[in-house]
Image: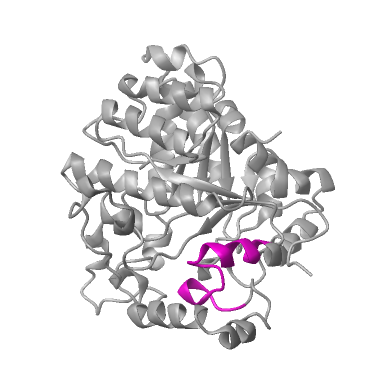
Amino acid sequence: MPYAEGRIYYDSDSHIMETLDWLTSYATPEQQGLIKPLETDSGGEGVLGRIDAAIARRADPEATKKLLEQPLISGPKGWDAYGATAQDERVHALDLLGFQKQLVFPTFSFGQFILSRKLERVYGGADMLNRHMADFCGADDRMMAVGSLPLNDPKLALTAAKEAIDMGIQALWVRTDPSGERSPSHTDYFDIWELMQSAGVPLVVHIGGGPGLHKNYHNNGRPKVTDWLGGGENLRGKDFHAISHTAENFLTAMIYDHVFQTFPQLMCGVIEMGATWVPGFLRNMDYGHHAFKKSEPLLQDLEMTPSEFFQRQVRVSLFPYEDAGWLIDQSGEDIFMFASDWPHPEGGRDPIGRFESTMENWQVAESAKDSFYQHNFASLMGIS
């Protein structure tokens, strides 16, 4: 039996685990040499060995059979997971997981180009990533490909968005910090938002797509700590509390500067950045609107409160250890989404069970559960 059964489950966060040449294998002849090889330090210790072991396991039917004797959701994660890197395995993995739809993100390849100062590298890398993501997810309509949309140059970004949509990308990942000295709410990007609204393609933001905690906060005069995966530059305790800050800045700009008002059908997903910050953030945005609208024309001209724009156009995924019942009680049933984060270990061994326990504690109605597991994802992705 599949892991998820008894209702429709849409998964707002899953990943591919890239091999070393995953991105560069999709370089056109003109793009050869643009992108540096994949660096694996942030993935923890022993990554190269795990990649080699995963390749060897896929070539060994007996090893694969043994791997599938355990439940997929609670089995090995990362490169060791069945379906983490191979397209044919991923299709079968979805049968075992039971999710009817799944947003699919890259893991490490985004970082191979997105911070480059050379535009040809940034947009060349995005093109490679988008073509590979569209190809990988094209094997099964349950997989919904997430592509990259760098905003460094508005004209190049518009072209990249058009090409990505034409090739079958179904959501576009943008960085949350200003690109090319422009706020993401700059009017130079309005043609892009119009295109995405017309195509029904949402923008998404995700952990790793913006600045985190300043590195000097880890310089405390004590020995450096590694992250929980064994690497040194991923996520540590102090980093965790800053995950949402960049998303809050991004969303405030998009709401206060009339992007969501101008494009009322443009949807935005906030993925793997937590959700416990949302109730307080909604109040803070409304407080800021009330306090500053006397002196700021854009705030005066908002047709709704900031929190109402958020509720209409923003959907937020949860970490499995967050209290889904409390969040729904505090902010309503139309915002939050189920996410497995599979095959990343952060998703845990039973995300549905953990969410269900919190919703039982808060006596969440079945209709609100349907929104959490299905309808809010459907509204983000334009699924009727």
Towards the viewer: 236 or 90 = 90
Which of the two residues, 379 or 16, is positioned nearer the viewer here? 16
Instruction: State the extent of the magenta-drawn residues as a range.
Output: 75-94
Q: Residue at x 54, y 67 (%)?
A: 343
Residue at 26% of width from left, 36% of height from top?
179
Residue 374 against residue 196 in the figure, above or below: below
Please state if 118 lies on the left or on the right of 113 as rendered: left
- In magenta segment, residue 369: no
**Residue 16 screen position, x and y as percent:** 47, 61
Q: Is residue 225 above or below residue 165?
A: below
The image position of residue 43, as x and y in percent, is 36, 71
The answer to whether residue 354 is visible is no
Relative to 175, 263 lies left or right: right
Residue at screen point 52% across, 40% down: 170
Q: Nearer the viewer, residue 245 or 149?
A: 149
Q: Is residue 197 above or below residue 75?
A: above
What residue do we see at 31% from left, 50% from top? 211
Q: Position of residue 72 (x, y in %)?
A: 64, 73
- Residue 59 or residue 290, whichever sits in front: 59
Q: Position of residue 332 (x, y in %)?
A: 69, 39
Quadrant of the image occupied by residue 315: top right
Q: Is residue 205 above or below residue 208?
A: above
Q: Is residue 78 magenta?
A: yes
